[in-house]
Image: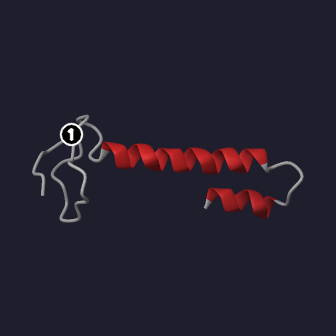
């Protein structure tokens, strides 16, 4: 386990395979965060693109 302390404090006992705070002081697992942001972007994009012409429930599927 990497013991580097960053902006958010000491790492918890749940530590994944990526080194903490390796790229920046503010993001513990940088590449995990970037890949998660890509998923959030795609969900938002799909929700916006399918908001016209479909029921609201289909737009919600992209947001969950």
Query: Image quarter for residue 60?
Result: bottom right
Position above or below: 25 against 4: above
Position above or below: 7 against 14: above
In this view of the protein, which residue sits in the foreground, 14 or 32? 32
Position above or below: 25 against 3: above
x 20%, y 48%: residue:
19
Residue 52 image offset from top left, x and y in percent: 86, 48
Residue 59 image offset from top left, x and y in percent: 75, 56
Query: Of all residues shown, which one is farthest toward the top?
Result: 24
The residue that mark 1 highlights is: 22
x 55%, y 49%: residue:
40
Query: Image quarter for residue 16?
Result: bottom left
x 58%, y 44%: residue:
41
Would you say 44 lies left or right of 20 here? right
Q: How many numbered marks, from 0 up?
A: 1
Would you say 47 lies left or right of 29 here? right
For the C terminus, give its image quadrant. Answer: bottom right
Position above or below: 52 against 58: above
Label 1: state its secondary structure.
loop
x 62%, y 51%: residue:
43
Query: Of all residues shown, which one is farthest toward the right?
Result: 53
Would you say 37 lies left or right of 27 here? right
For the N terminus, give its image quadrant. Answer: bottom left
Residue 18 image offset from top left, x and y in percent: 25, 51
């Amino acid at each position: 386990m990497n013991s580097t302390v960053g902006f958010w404090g000491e790492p918890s006992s749940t530590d994944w395979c990526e080194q903490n705070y390796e790229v920046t002081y503010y993001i513990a697992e940088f590449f995990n965060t970037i890949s998660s942001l890509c998923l959030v972007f795609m969900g938002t994009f799909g929700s916006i693109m399918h908001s016209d012409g479909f029921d609201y429930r289909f737009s919600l599927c992209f947001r969950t």
